[in-house]
């Protein structure tokens, strides 16, 4: 299934690709590839923080995927519309997880985490490089060292992050990618809407 900001490609091992069509947070635009939902636009399916906070206690990790517990109780609390959005979001996240390299992921509490070492430059990394996958989004961290040595992009637990995406997010934070980059960055990516949400410096 095509996505506005996430496509699956087969290169021997399935790889998740964060494409250059990612939408920055707050944008309601859609790319030509967008067919996430034929009935809903990203602005209509965004899960509010209050809903996320409520749902958090109903989501558990079992057999390497997110599982929604006590569905009837949650349905009564959320109502049918928000409940269906939550169910679809979890399905999308589990599909995303299935395309990642599970050997590079570990369970931490109620999230999946994958790290990328900065190798010989680790003592001057200025931040960390990792991905944390929650039931409703992924938070991507890129250290200053990673940004300085980004090249065309990097693969993080099987997800390809192109230079153009990192550069656009960094630029919106006032961070210029180059030999003198001093700040790492982080950003949230929603699998369902194809939108980048919160972001900041490390």
Image (cartoon, grey):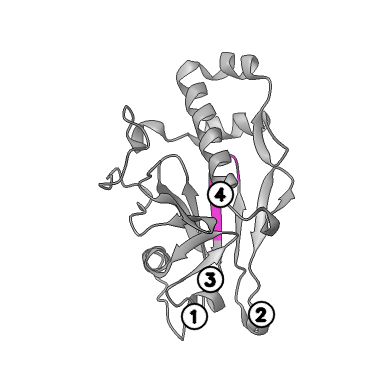
Determine the CA span between mark 1 and mark 4.
Answer: 27 Å
Relative side of 39 to 64, left or right: left
Decide which of tag 1 and tag 4 comes sooner along the chain: 4
Image point (67%, 49%), residue name: 112
How far, Cα to Cα, is label 1 from label 2? Answer: 13 Å
What distance separates the C-alpha of mark 3 from that of mark 4? Answer: 26 Å
Relative to 118, say whether 179 is above or below.
Answer: below
The quarter of the picture where residue 123 lies is bottom right
Looking at marks 4 and 2 on the same chain, the residue that comes earlier in the sequence is marked by 4
Q: Nearer the viewer, mark 3 or mark 4?
A: 4
Q: Which residue is mark 2?
A: 119
Dot label at residue 148: 1
- Label pair 4/2, CB-CB below 8 angstroms: no
Q: Position of residue 164 (x, y in %)?
A: 37, 67
- In this rendering, the label closer to the viewer, 2 or 3: 2
- Of helix, strand and loop, which one carries label 3? loop
Q: State the residue position of label 4.
A: 99
Q: CA distance from mark 2 to mark 3?
A: 16 Å
Magenta span: 134-140
Residue under label 3: 184
Q: Are marks 2 and 3 in contact (CB under 8 Å)?
A: no
């Amino acid at each position: 299934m095509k996505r506005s900001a996430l496509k699956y490609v087969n290169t021997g091992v399935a790889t998740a690709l964060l494409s250059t069509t990612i939408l920055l947070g707050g944008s309601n635009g859609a790319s030509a590839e967008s067919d996430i939902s034929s009935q809903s636009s990203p602005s209509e399916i965004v899960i509010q923080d209050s809903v996320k906070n409520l749902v958090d206690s109903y989501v558990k990790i079992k057999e390497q995927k997110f599982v929604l517990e006590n569905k009837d109780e949650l349905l009564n609390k959320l109502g049918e519309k928000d409940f269906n959005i939550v169910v679809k979001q979890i399905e999308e996240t589990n599909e995303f997880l299935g395309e990642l390299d599970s050997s590079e992921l570990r369970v931490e509490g109620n999230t999946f985490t994958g790290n990328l070492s900065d190798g010989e430059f680790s003592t001057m990394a200025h931040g960390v490089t990792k991905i944390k996958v929650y039931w409703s989004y992924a938070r991507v961290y890129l250290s200053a060292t990673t940004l300085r040595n980004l090249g065309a992009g990097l693969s993080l637990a099987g997800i390809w992050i192109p230079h153009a995406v990192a550069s656009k997010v960094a630029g919106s934070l006032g961070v210029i990618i180059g030999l003198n980059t001093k700040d790492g960055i982080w950003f949230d990516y929603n699998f369902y809407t194809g939108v980048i949400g919160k972001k900041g410096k490390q």
